[in-house]
Amino acid sequence: MTALPEIVLVEDDAREAELVVSALGRDVRVVTVTSGAAALEHLRTQRPKLVLLDLKMGGATGFDVLAAVRDDPGLRGLPIVVLTSSSDPRDVERAYALGAHGYVVKPIAHARLAERLAALRRFWLAPAARAGAPA
């Protein structure tokens, strides 16, 4: 039996996390962490296929996490997609400047969120993407 690909979801809002996990489906293993510190701790011991990172969190923000990951030689290659409610162009620009691989604005409608997450999964977890992903 093949292990399910792991996605780390960094989200401090339990309701939002539940919606994202539900939208991602059952053929992935989603590990949800609720703070920037917990995210960094987890990422230093595990190698997920993808990180979905909220920007607006208490304590360390998503920007802080992104900067820390990109500054760490052991983590800098991890694919990180920002998944946030912010559509502010300054946030988008800053996330990409810090090394985000993608930026997805969470829609209000659950069906639209599921569509966006399905597209992310197809791109980042497809066999070709897995073969080229950092180990």
Image: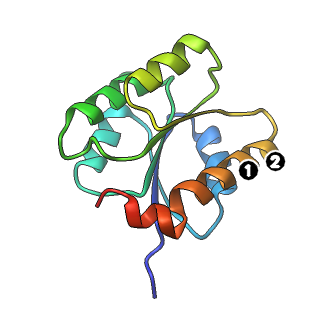
Q: Do the residues under discs 2 and 1 have CB atoms within 8 angstroms? A: yes
In percent of width and height, residue 118 lies at: 68, 55
In the depicted view, which residue is nearer to us: 109 or 129?
Answer: 129
- Using the rendered view, name the quadrant where residue 94 is placed: top left
Which residue is the site of mark 2?
111
Per the image, label 2 sits on a secondary structure element best described as: helix
Tell me what residue is drawn at x 30 percent, y 49 percent.
Answer: 42
In percent of width and height, residue 49 lies at: 42, 58
Give left or right: position of 10 versus 117.
left
Tell me what residue is drawn at x 27 percent, y 41 percent.
Answer: 76
Tell me what residue is drawn at x 41 percent, y 46 percent.
Answer: 79
- Using the rendered view, name the quadrant where residue 41 is placed: top left
Q: State whether residue 122 appears in this view.
A: yes
Q: Quadrant of the C terminus?
A: bottom left
In percent of width and height, residue 132 lies at: 39, 61
Give left or right: position of 111 versus 82.
right
Looking at the rendered structure, the kind of residue marked 2 is: Ala
Per the image, label 1 sits on a secondary structure element best described as: helix
Circle 2 residues within 10 Å: few <14, some 14–19, many ≥20: few
Circle 1 residues within 10 Å: few <14, some 14–19, many ≥20: many
In the depicted view, which residue is nearer to us: 52 or 58?
Answer: 52
Mark identifier at residue 114? 1
Q: Farthest top residue?
A: 90
Looking at the rendered structure, the kind of residue marked 1 is: Ala
In percent of width and height, residue 101 lies at: 47, 38
Structural distance between the alpha carbons of marks 2 and 1: 5 Å
Give left or right: position of 111 versus 11.
right
Q: Is residue 131 above or below residue 47?
A: below
Mark identifier at residue 17? none
Q: Farthest bottom residue?
A: 1
Q: State whether residue 58 appears in this view.
A: no
